[in-house]
Image: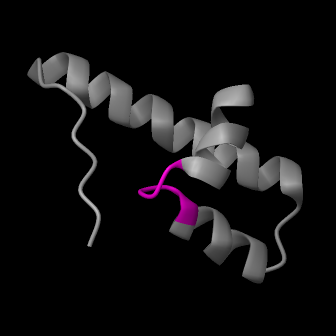
Amino acid sequence: MISGHRAAHHNPVQKPLADRLWKAGKPHKVIIIAIARKFATMVIALRKSRQKWAAQTA
């Protein structure tokens, strides 16, 4: 939960998702779980491909 909360506010890759869900009227808990789930998916994908995290902002 904490990683989702932090990512929603500070991660430039996941902040747009949090903002989009918030504007859609989703409850705070739903937003945090969605962010944490996306974060976990990214971590698993990075481990499988043996790559390091490199934030790519537009």
Q: Is residue 13 above or below residue 22?
A: above
Q: Position of residue 13 (x, y in %)?
A: 41, 56
Residue 1 appears in the figure: no
Residue 41 appears in the figure: yes
Can you tell which quarter of the image residue 37 is in? top right
Left or right: where does residue 46 sit relative to residue 32? Answer: left
Can you tell which quarter of the image residue 27 is in? bottom right
Q: Quadrant of the C terminus?
A: bottom left
| Residue visible at 59% across and 43% down in the picture | 7
Q: Farthest bottom residue?
A: 23
Q: Is residue 8 magenta?
A: no
Q: Farthest front residue?
A: 10
Left or right: where does residue 55 sit relative to residue 35? Answer: left
Q: Is residue 16 above or below residue 5?
A: below
Name the one closer to the observer, 37 or 18: 18
| Residue visible at 33% across and 23% down in the picture | 44
Q: Quadrant of the N terminus?
A: top right
Q: Is residue 50 above or below residue 58?
A: above
First to last magenta residue range: 11-15
Name the one closer to the observer, 16 or 29: 16
Q: Position of residue 14 (x, y in %)?
A: 50, 55
Q: Position of residue 19 (x, y in %)?
A: 65, 72
Can you tell which quarter of the image residue 50 is in? top left
Name the one closer to the observer, 39 or 57: 57
Left or right: where does residue 47 sit relative to residue 20? Answer: left
Q: Position of residue 11 (x, y in %)?
A: 50, 49
Q: Is residue 12 above or below residue 43?
A: below
Provide the major secondary structure of the magenta segment: loop
| Residue visible at 85% across and 47% down in the picture | 29
| Residue visible at 64% across and 63% down in the picture | 18
